[in-house]
Amino acid sequence: MSKPVLSVRGLTVEFPTRRGLLTAVEDITFDIMPGEVLGVVGESGAGKSMTGAAIIGLIDPPGRIARGEIWLGEKRIDNLAPDEMRKIRGRRIGMIFQDPLTSLNPLYRISRQLIETIRTHLPLSESDARKRAVKLLDDVGIPDAARRIDDYPHQFSGGMRQRVVIALALCADPEVVIADEPTTALDVSVQAQIIDVMKEICAERGAAIMLVTHDMGVIAETADRVAVMYAGRLAELGPVASVIKDAKHPYSQGLMGAIPKLGENLDRLVHIPGSMPRLNAIPQGCAFNPRCPKVFDKCRIHRPAASEIEPGRRAACWLYPEVT
Amino acid sequence: MSDTLLDVRHLSRRFDVSAPWLNRKIEGKDKVYVNAVKDVSFTVAKGKTFALVGESGSGKSTIARLIVGLLEPTEGEIVFDGTSLARGLRGAEARRLRRRFQMIFQDPLASLNPRWRVVDIIAEPLRVFEKTMNDRARRIRVGELLTLVGLSPEDGIKFPHQFSGGQRQRIAIARALAANPEFIVCDEPTSALDVSVQAQILNLMRDLQDEFGLTYVFISHNLQVVRHMADEIGVLYLGRLAEVGEAEALFATPQHPYTRMLLDAVPDIEMTGRRRKKVEGEIPSPIDPPPGCPFHPRCPFANERCRIEIPGLTRRGVQAAACHAVEEGRI
Ligand SMILES: Nc1ncnc2c1ncn2[C@@H]1O[C@H](COP(=O)(O)OP(=O)(O)OP(=O)(O)O)[C@@H](O)[C@H]1O
Ligand SMILES: Nc1ncnc2c1ncn2[C@@H]1O[C@H](COP(=O)(O)OP(=O)(O)O)[C@@H](O)[C@H]1O
Ligand code: SF4
Ligand code: SF4
Ligand SMILES: [Mg+2]
Ligand SMILES: [Mg+2]
């Protein structure tokens, strides 16, 4: 067995506010193996982006990691000084965000941004860095890369810009890429192209991906395993086919049934009443209990931990006894 | 065959997107227009759902705004239950027709007045259309409407910001239903919502349709959602209808190459192992659309004729596609 490239242990992220402490992410544990794609799915506010931000050390103050550890290979990274973390970000961990313009500076040519990032992290001459940048742009499918590299971001379409961002994220050969809703801002016909490029280029380089999205369809096509988040907590984690075809946690079951599918024509979609609680109103016990069709007494009092229910599968639900 | 409630005929809408007059004079530039909607025709049967799908900028919202009268067409006309809306309806006749159709928007917060209580928001159409209704009757009716959309009459005293996104969309639906309309234009009503909440709203909309015999024009970029809701579908590309037809058939046997491509791009969430075909290119700028068939730069079946001649809709059974290759029987 190889060792995980990224290991998150009991991660808890808190925001102190005037009205008290808000827990945005609570007790999240998962590993990502080298070259693996881990999908993180959940509805808006579930804590997906916050988990990603914690890993790359970019939580906005006053938010902070209150508990837990994050390991990148053999190195613990949750307690690093800011400038030490800056060296890891971009070098060992690449980042892709929803809006390409948060990663690209509109005032600089693409060439300058790529070459600078490459030279920050790798000991290359200007001209070698440029060669590397052109090759990367070519790899992510930018036609005529040697010429287009001197364009500005606004001269590219949305999909092309996102390709540039992927090139930027991969320019120092990171071991893991955190991709937060990388296709959400794109048109349907372009989304699939971007997912393909991202997956191919990471596979070629052996980079693992943490793919954060609210779109279960993207996960189904891309991920090896999936973590389902609800109200800042891990509801379920397992191989993607098992979770999609045979979800265990009542929330993941409801989520799967709520998605309209091309292959079936139902009169009604699965109805989960209510909506996800706000951070200041997370119910006692299981966070899903007010919406859960299978709730029983224990759920309202005690919080279930995400424990192993089958080899390789975890769920945070009292319906399943932990296997030991 | 069911009766036609809405008949959209050769509808076009052009927008002037030129630089200001002075800049144009100095730089010697011409006026610039965008054809947001170009020669679009379709009919919507009473009690049915007609869906418009298309990627961003394809003209969906513009058609919605044209239908409900928030925009004037540049060309073409819209006939509602036998009466043309193009001729600038006035007075009582306009009011009678207007109350029969309503619109629901993507962002419920933007369409609900933040300073009004929910009860006043929902009562507003009643004040306009039910002038004889007294306060007490109106209050009771608002309570009924709130219950109908799954909220409680007590929620009426709250303000829109005190609700979640899904609850706000319920409020918008209650307001749309207040005047007992027959016809509702829904522009991306669930696009801002999470899937579990989206399912609640889609279920609610179908229940209301069954209960009141409502007719919907339902706009979405999400093909799975459209598949779930629609009886008929129109596929838009760069302001034109690429294909229109009965929903079941259009999903089973898409004709137009763009429809095929869109269906191929839908992620395989059931994990059937279906292999996606690679989709090439992106949507060109609507300001400077390609000549001939607007889809030709991305189309694997394009030939010389496609680059020159704009294809018209050719009907084949319950489907019609605007494509030379389909018409010639090449694909
Ligand atoms: N600066 C902040 N102060 C207080 N709470 C915050 C802050 N940033 C995020 N949160 C809260 O943390 C929770 C998780 O946020 P996060 O952005 O990770 O959710 P998400 O799953 O990515 O949602 P979305 O899909 O909407 O981006 C949310 O409830 C959010 O409101
Ligand atoms: N008021 C307007 N002024 C200028 N251009 C507009 C206006 N409204 C829409 N457009 C243009 O018309 C096209 C279609 O727009 P729209 O109907 O909003 O698309 P969709 O809703 O499908 O995303 C787009 O290119 C858009 O930029
Ligand atoms: S712990 Fe109880 S409430 Fe929570 S998901 Fe399981 S059954 Fe439902
Ligand atoms: S008309 Fe030609 S270019 Fe247009 S969709 Fe048909 S085959 Fe393709
Ligand atoms: Mg997010
Ligand atoms: Mg729109």
Image (cartoon, grey):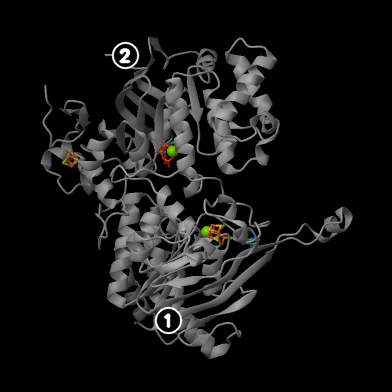
Q: Position of residue A279 (x, y in %)?
A: 35, 39
Kindly identify the amino acid type of the residue bearing the numbered disc 1.
Answer: Leu
B150 sits left or right of B120 in the view: left
What kind of element bears circle 1? strand
Front-lying residue, A67 or A11: A11
Is residue B201 in view from this perspective?
A: yes
A110 sits left or right of B263 in the view: right
What kind of element bears circle 2? loop
Instruction: Judge whether B174 appears above or below B55 on screen.
Output: below
Farthest residue to the right: give it: B26
Q: Position of residue A247 (x, y in %)?
A: 21, 40
Q: CA distance from mark 1 to mark 2?
A: 64 Å
Farthest residue to the bottom: give it: B92
B270 sits left or right of B260 in the view: left
Quadrant position of ligand 4: bottom right
- How many numbered marks does the figure carry? 2
Give the chain letter at badge 2: A
Front-lying residue, A92 or A232: A92
Q: Which class describes the residues within 10 Å of circle 1: few (<14), some (14-19), or many (20+)?
A: some
B109 sits left or right of A14 in the view: right
